[in-house]
Amino acid sequence: MSPELISIIVLVAVFVLATTRSVNMGALSFAAAFGVGELVADLDADGIFAGFPGDLFVVLVGVTYLFALARANGTTEWLVHAAVRLVRGRVALIPWVMFAITGVLTAIGAVSPAAVAIVAPIALSFAARYGISPLLMGAMVVHGAQGGGFSPISIYGSIVNGIVEREKLPGNEITLFLASLVVNLVIAAVVFVVCGGLKLPRHATATATTAPRPADDPADVTAVEGAASGLTPDRVATLLALVALVVAVLVFDLDAGLAAITLAALLSLFWPKDGKKAANEISWPTVLLICGVLTYVGVLQEMGTIDYAGRAVSDIGVPLLAALLLCYIGAVISAFASSVGIMGALIPLAVPFLAKGDIGAVGMVAALSVSATVVDVSPFSTNGALVLAAAPDVDRDRFFRQLMVYGGVVVATVPAVAWLAMVVPGLG
C-alpha cells in the first residue's frame, strides 16, 4: 500500500473516530500527524510542525477572546434584547430578528456554535410563547449564524481565506461572504414560508396554543435585567472595540487576529475580572480542532498526498462532475462532523485539481464552504444539537426527527444548487 493511500485512510479514520467516539478531531489529527509523519513520511518534529497554522491560531484565540469578553460583560445580551425590542408586537418579524442577530454575531467574530448557544434559548422561548414552529425558529437561528459566518473578520471567513492564501489560490473575500449570506437567506425565506411564517399573527398577543410565561421565567428575567442595566461603561467600550475591529480589518487591512487580541487585552486592563473570565472561555476546542486538522494537512502536503488526491479527482475526466462530487463529500461528512475541519481538509485536497484551470477557484472554494456549513442544521452537528437542546415544551423525539429530515433535505439539495450557481459559471 502506498504512503499516500495510508495517509488518506488515516484521515478517514480520524473523521470516523471523532464522530463516533466524541473525541476532538484536532487531538486525533495531531496524533495522526505524529504517527504518519514519523512512521510513514519519515519527517522529524520540525517537518511535522511546519504545517502548524500559527496565523490562524492567533485569529481563533484573538477573536474568540474578544467575543468572550463581550459575553462576560453582557454586551451580547444587550444587543439581543435591543434587537428584540425593535419588533415588539410583530410576531412574524421575530424569526427574522433572530436570523439577523446570529448573523451579526458571527460576522463580527463569534464562533457559530457560540452565537447559536446565545440566541437559540431566547429564540425557542419566543417560539413556544407565540406559537411559532420550533423547526422554523431553529432553522432561522442556524442559517443566520451561517449567513454571517464568512465575513472577512469572522472565524469561518478568516479560516477559509487563510487557507486560500496559504495555498496560493485566487481568492475573493466579498464573494465568499455574499455567497454564504445569499444561500442562507434564500433557504431561510423558503423555510419561513413552508413552516407557516406567513400565517403568524401580526401582534404579539398570547396564542391559543401557548400561555404567557410566569414572571419568574428565566428568559423573561434575563431580558428584564438586560433592559434595566442598559449600556454600562464596559459595554460601551466593548461595542467600540467591535467597531474598531471592523474598521481595522476592512479599512486599514490589519490582521484580524492581532487586532482582536490587542483590543481584548486593552479591555482586560480596565476590567480584569471580565478579562480573566473571558480567557477561560476562549474557544479552545475549536482552536485545537483547526490547528490539529491543518497540521495533519501540512503533513499530507509534505508527503505528496495532496497532489496524489488531486490527480485522482482529476482522473474522473469531467471537471464539473469532480467538483460536484467534492461538494457532496463536504456536505455529507460535515452533517456528522466539524464543518471547519472539513473545510480545512477539502480545500487543500482540491488545490491540484483547481491548478489545472478548468474550474474557477473562487467559485469552487465558495461552493465547498457553503456546502460544508449550510448542513449544520443537522441534529448531529453542534448547531443542530444546540437548537434541539434549547427548545422548551416540545416532543423532543419528534423535533429530532424533524431536524434530521430537514438536514437530509439540505444535504441532498444545497450542494447541487451551490455547484450550479458558483462552479458552473466559472467564478474566479
Image: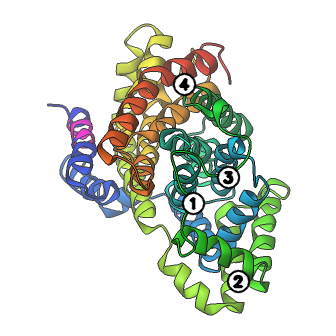
Mark 2 near mark 1, Cβ–Cβ under 8 Å? no
**Which residue matches tag 1?**
212
Label 2, residues with CA under 10 Å away: few <14, some 14-19, many ≥20: many
Question: Which residue is outermost to the front?
Answer: 208
- Seen at 33% across and 36% down, the residue is 401
**Which residue matches tag 2?**
267
For discs 4 and 2, the disc positioned in front in the rendered view: 2
Is 8 above or below relative to 424?
below
Q: Amino acid at mark 1?
A: Pro
Label 1, residues with CA under 10 Å away: few <14, some 14-19, many ≥20: few
Mark 1 near mark 4, Cβ–Cβ under 8 Å? no
Question: Which residue is outermost to the left?
Answer: 1
Q: Nearer the viewer, residue 123 or 110?
A: 123
Is 394 above or below relative to 60?
above
Spatial separation of the CA atoms under disc 2 and disc 1: 39 Å
* Label 3 residue SS: helix
Q: Nearer the viewer, residue 403 or 342?
A: 403
| Chain-order first, disc 1 or disc 4 | 1
Whole-percent x and y of residue 151?
Answer: 68, 47
| Chain-order first, disc 2 or disc 1 | 1
Residue range corresponding to the magenta coloring: 6-12
The stretch drawn in magenta includes residue 9? yes
Label 3, residues with CA under 10 Å away: few <14, some 14-19, many ≥20: many
Spatial separation of the CA atoms under disc 1 and disc 3: 33 Å
For discs 2 and 1, the disc positioned in front in the rendered view: 1
**Which residue matches tag 4?**
355
